[in-house]
Image (cartoon, rainbow, N blue to C red):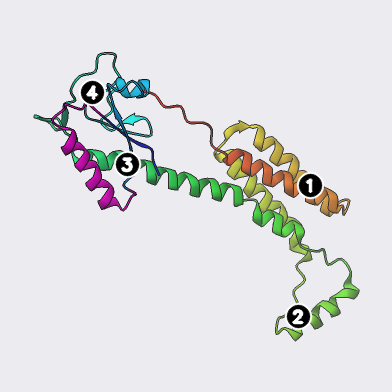
């Protein structure tokens, strides 16, 4: 839910219409009818609320029309279309200021989730047991047959499958290096620990440590940097 602020002068004739437009947009969008109002001449109002004309609507601290704060605020004049000027922002302007933030935030959350979960196939293959004992195969076959399943010896494919999934995870980290290349370096070391620990030394400690570090590298890379907002002016 974005933070919405409504800034106004008590004697401004456009305040009621602007407030009504904001309310209708929120109702049409199914969003909560909640926003913070600041009277610009109120001594308790924050500094930023005194640097815009009346009426002004801020969404996450940004003016819906892209106006920059000024030390000489005055009445607001909005231009919804070329050649048309009015003292109230249009519903379309308010809607456009609210919609992109929600859709972009949802898309970013989905991308970050996908980036964090990208290591799961590699972890799954790394945790599969190695069927290196042929004497055990009849037992596996009997158990699977009782469940109506056929026995397949996946041992020859375990190493290449694990390597492929690790490479895919590292490629996703390298494709969007949000935190530089340090997560990629960590991921390379983690992947090496998984492969060497499982297929060379048969070390569960190395495998589990590598999986944990691979998950950490994916999460580190997907974690967003703090956004730096700037005025369009």
Name the residue nearer the viewer: 35 or 120: 35
Which element is circle 2 on?
A: helix
- Magenta stretch: helix, strand or loop mostly: helix
Report how far apart the C-alphas of labels 4 and 1 lie in the structure. 57 Å
Mark toward the start of the polypeptide (3 vs 1): 3
Mark toward the start of the polypeptide (4 vs 2): 4
Residue corresponding to mark 3:
98
Residue corresponding to mark 4:
53
Mark toward the start of the polypeptide (1 vs 2): 2
Whole-percent x, y for residue 120 in the image: 65, 55
Report how far apart the C-alphas of labels 1 and 2 lie in the structure. 31 Å
Q: Which residues are magenta?
A: 8-32
Report how far apart the C-alphas of labels 3 and 4 lie in the structure. 20 Å
Residue corresponding to mark 2:
144
Write down the quadrant of residue 73 in the picture. Answer: top left
Q: Residue at x 20, y 27 (%)?
A: 10
> Which residue sits furthest top?
71
Left or right of 14? Residue 112 is right
Q: Residue at x 80, y 80 (%)?
A: 141
| In front: label 3 or label 4 | 4
Report how far apart the C-alphas of labels 3 and 2 lie in the structure. 55 Å
| In front: label 4 or label 2 | 4
Mark toward the start of the polypeptide (3 vs 4): 4
Residue corresponding to mark 1:
209
Q: Is residue 94 magenta?
A: no
Report how far apart the C-alphas of labels 3 and 1 lie in the structure. 44 Å
Graded by Cα atoms within 10 Å as few (under 14), some (14 to 19) or many (20 or more), the crowding at tag 1 reads some
Q: Residue at x 79, y 47 (%)?
A: 209
């Amino acid at each position: 839910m974005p933070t919405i602020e409504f800034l106004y002068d008590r004697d401004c004739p456009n305040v009621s219409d602007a407030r009504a437009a904001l309310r209708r947009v929120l109702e049409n969008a199914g969003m909560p009818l909640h926003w913070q109002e600041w009277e610009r001449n109120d001594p308790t109002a924050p500094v930023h609320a005194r640097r815009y004309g009346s009426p002004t609507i801020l969404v996450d601290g940004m003016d819906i029309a892209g106006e920059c704060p000024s030390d000489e605020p005055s009445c607001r004049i909005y231009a919804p279309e070329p050649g048309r000027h009015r003292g109230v922002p249009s519903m379309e302007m308010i809607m456009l200021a609210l919609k992109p933030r929600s859709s972009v935030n949802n898309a970013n959350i989905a991308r970050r989730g996908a980036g964090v979960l990208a290591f799961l196939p590699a972890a799954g293959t790394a945790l599969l047991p190695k069927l290196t004992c042929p004497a055990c195969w009849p037992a596996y076959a009997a158990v699977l047959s009782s469940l109506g399943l056929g026995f397949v010896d996946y041992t020859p494919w375990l190493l290449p499958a694990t390597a492929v999934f690790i490479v895919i995870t590292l490629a996703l980290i390298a494709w969007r290096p949000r935190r530089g290349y340090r997560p990629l370096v960590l991921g390379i070391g983690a992947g090496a620990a998984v492969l060497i620990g499982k297929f060379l030394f048969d070390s569960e400690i190395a495998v589990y440590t590598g999986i944990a570090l691979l998950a950490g590298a994916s999460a580190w890379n997907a974690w967003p940097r703090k956004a730096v907002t700037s005025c369009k002016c």
